[in-house]
Image (cartoon, rainbow, N blue to C red):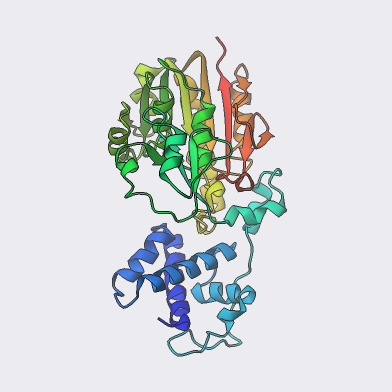
Amino acid sequence: MTPAARLQAAIEVLDEVIASVRDDGPPADAIVTRYFKHRRYAGSKDRRAVRELVFRGIRHTAERPENGRAAMIGLAKSEPELWDLFGQPRGPEPLSDHDTCAESGSVPAWLVPELSPLVTPDEWPALLERAPLDLRVNIAKSSRDELLEQFADAAPTPISPWGIRLPPGSRIDDHPAFASGLFEVQDEGSQLIALSCGAENRERIIDLCAGAGGKSLALAAAASDATIIATDSNRARLSGLRPRAERAGAVIETRLLNPPNELEELADWRTMADIVLVDAPCSGSGTWRRNPEGRWRLTPQRLDQLTAAQERLLDIAAALVRPGGRLVYAVCSLLSREGAGQIERFRQRHSSWISEDTAIAAGRADGAGRLLTPAHRTDGFFVARLRRPC
Ligand SMILES: C[S@@+](CC[C@H](N)C(=O)[O-])C[C@H]1O[C@@H](n2cnc3c(N)ncnc32)[C@H](O)[C@@H]1O
């Protein structure tokens, strides 16, 4: 494919991404793969180049653009070599006075007042930088030093003692250490959330919003004699945990929850848990560097729904924690309403609960919790730990 044809392909993919955002469809990555499924003429270099262009276009554009062409015209303003490709054979139509151009930016205007004031504008570009690939060593089976020896270009993660870091886009799923359960792919930020639980052997732990169990697995490795139950309301996600637990050699019970009956379904755990981790559904604003079109998906209504769900899940979790036990709340969000604000409101409803140090030696204190951003080279997240009085 010529550079002009690649630009035309990127515009077509972006049109599909924009439609998918509107219809709550699949993520951009899946759309790129789907686009090339029926275009066998495109070689691997073409696919990589088009994918790169698509993601550069998304990262460059804060608000959902009118169409792919407007996004690429916006990008061409800062990448002049793209400008000359409009009107070339197999490329996009020549530029005309009727064209619209998407504004460049990192944070959608309506979200700026929602963003934690700790995230200053000079940090915003880092929210969209490509993320490295972090692995978490399964400390029940191996050690970080052993894992580092297996990857020539790896370095220890700066904050988490369990992590190693590889360059973005490294391929690891065919590595023999993966099949043997010696590591999992997990961003350093997620490792730190698991670390904040301070899980100990023989404790009883609920990972209430476990998804496919990334944090349950980290907890099981850290406290191999703990009893861990992973729950979620999404069957497909939760079913992803079993093969991972088998690989890791971890014993984790799973339980599918059916809202609004979560508390009844967990009646046997009422006031019994030493730790309840609530890794709550959220805006994902801390993970835009992996999923930059997440900025285009979020709406004020969706944010309202998410904050209401977080509040509900926190109250469910509080009912499960034993006296003296702890509740750990985390969101991969940089919005105050979902993080420090959510915990402030929790403490108004549960005034006797005591906030504790999260034991993370990085980031910034944010209300009763801690905030890390991609400026710390992790996904952005907020975490807080609260103890129920005895
Ligand atoms: C941020 S994700 C969790 C990610 C996961 N802990 C991990 O480490 O990969 C939030 C999860 O909350 C789940 N969820 C949403 N509503 C829920 C509910 N009412 N009860 C339990 N889980 C819920 C979603 O299905 C989603 O998997």
Please say if 277 is above or below 60. above
Please say if 154 is above or below 69. above
Report whether 249 appears left or right of 273: left
Report whether 171 appears left or right of 69: left
Report whether 322 appears left or right of 377: left
To which quarter of the image does residue 196 belong? Answer: top right
Please say if 143 is above or below 135. above
- The residue positioned 37% from the left and 24% from the top of the image is 228
Residue 47, image x, y percentages: 39, 70
Q: Quadrant of the C terminus?
A: top right
Report whether 107 appears left or right of 138: right
Residue 15, image x, y percentages: 45, 71
Q: Quadrant of the N terminus?
A: bottom left
To which quarter of the image does residue 259 belong? Answer: top left
- The residue positioned 61% from the left and 87% from the top of the image is 97
Residue 161, image x, y percentages: 52, 32
Q: In terms of image quarters, where does ligand 1 lie?
A: top left
Instruction: Report the label total.
Output: 0
Q: Say if residue 195 shows up in the picture.
A: yes
Q: Most extreme residue toward the top, as rendered? A: 390
Q: Say if residue 313 shows up in the picture.
A: no
